[in-house]
Image: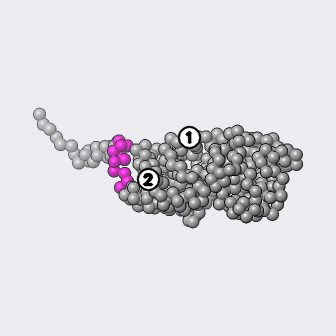
Amino acid sequence: MVFTLPRPRVLLGLAAVMALTASPALQAQTFPSKPIRWIVPYTAGGPADIIARAMQPKMQENLGQPVVIDNRPGGNANIGHELGSKAAPDGYTILYVVPNVVTNPLLYKNMVDPVKDLDPVAKITSQAYVMVANPSFPAKTVGEVIEVARKKGVNCASGGGLPGFGCLWFKSHSKADFTHVQYKGNGPAMNDLIGGQVDVMIDLFNTAMPQVKAGRANAIALTGRKRGMPLPELPIIAETIPGFVLEGWHAVMAPPGTPAPIVNRLNQAIHAALADPGVIQRITESSIEVTPSTPAELAATIKEDWAKYSRITQDAGIKPE
């Protein structure tokens, strides 16, 4: 019997097949072996960029590789979303996301689908908003705001994003005359609220709190699931409108098909960064809550938000442009 050795070309082919069929667990054992690119679809110095850069050193320490932040602003974050969704699913590209990854496809055509085009890795933060009013506005509670809207109408301002959905939600719930006035940014909206051009506004704490403390705006209610900082005595809207929860969040996602062991390794590094006291202090100083999650918990948040904001846009008659 004569034995023949495999030819070099055959050996190379077998090696390639073995590499391609290596188990995800085996891939995770060697992950990461090179720098990781973290796409942040916003400008340097903005809230998302500040949080990412606060986390970056501790993530690098945990992973043993550089984490390179790549700011890619534009297109309401969809430029960054596209880059993240089309990157190789190997864990070496991750994407910073906020709720517009969910709301973009409800407002615009040809947007990245947060369920089909991206995989969840971890939530980073959660944040409620606050409804404020001009001091001369007669309503002091959510119920009174609705009554005023039913009698003579209310202008509800926002700087866009989830607060805008909140104004639309008030309208669909109350069946009253709520007019959403959207501004290009929270600052101009707050200026008009102070000036009396609009009645109420749903806003971020960092924009609203200085005006509330100065007496230029009245705080009416929080939009979160429970009462809490920075106004622990203030009621939540859900106490008057059951189920009304409007919470922003920041999270990390990965290209679709990223192996679960690699996703879990990234999740571990994110949790490690968010457990650091210095990182926690840097994030929470803006009244943002640190809420690291599992990939499944982030997926559930996205699913819940998709259902919620789909219903709001349908009630408002909004179709993707």
Residue at image coords 56%, 40%:
300
Structural crowding at the residue carrying mark 2, measured as other residues with C-alpha within 10 Å and reported as few (<14), some (14–19) or many (≥20) = some
Give the residue at x 37% y 47%: 28
Q: Identify the secondary structure beneath mark 2.
A: helix
Label disc, if present, on residue 287 of the rendered structure = none
Mark 1 surroundings within 10 Å by alpha-carbon count, few (fewer than 14), some (14 through 19), many (20 or more): few
Q: Name the residue under label 2.
A: 272
Please state the extent of the stretch shown in magenta in the rendering.
23-36
Query: In the rendering, at what x and y percent does residue 245 appear?
Result: 66, 44
Looking at numbered disc 1 in the image, what kind of residue is underneath it?
A: Ala
Residue at left offset 76%, top offset 41%: 173
Farthest residue, direction left: 1
Which quadrant holds residue 49?
bottom right
* Residue beneath the point at 16% across and 40% down: 4
In this figure, which residue is indicated by the disc labeled 1? Answer: 300
Comes first in the chain, label 2 or label 1: 2
Q: How far apart are marks 2 and 1 (CA)?
A: 22 Å
Query: Which amino acid is tagged 2?
Result: Ala
Identify the residue at the far top of this view. Answer: 1
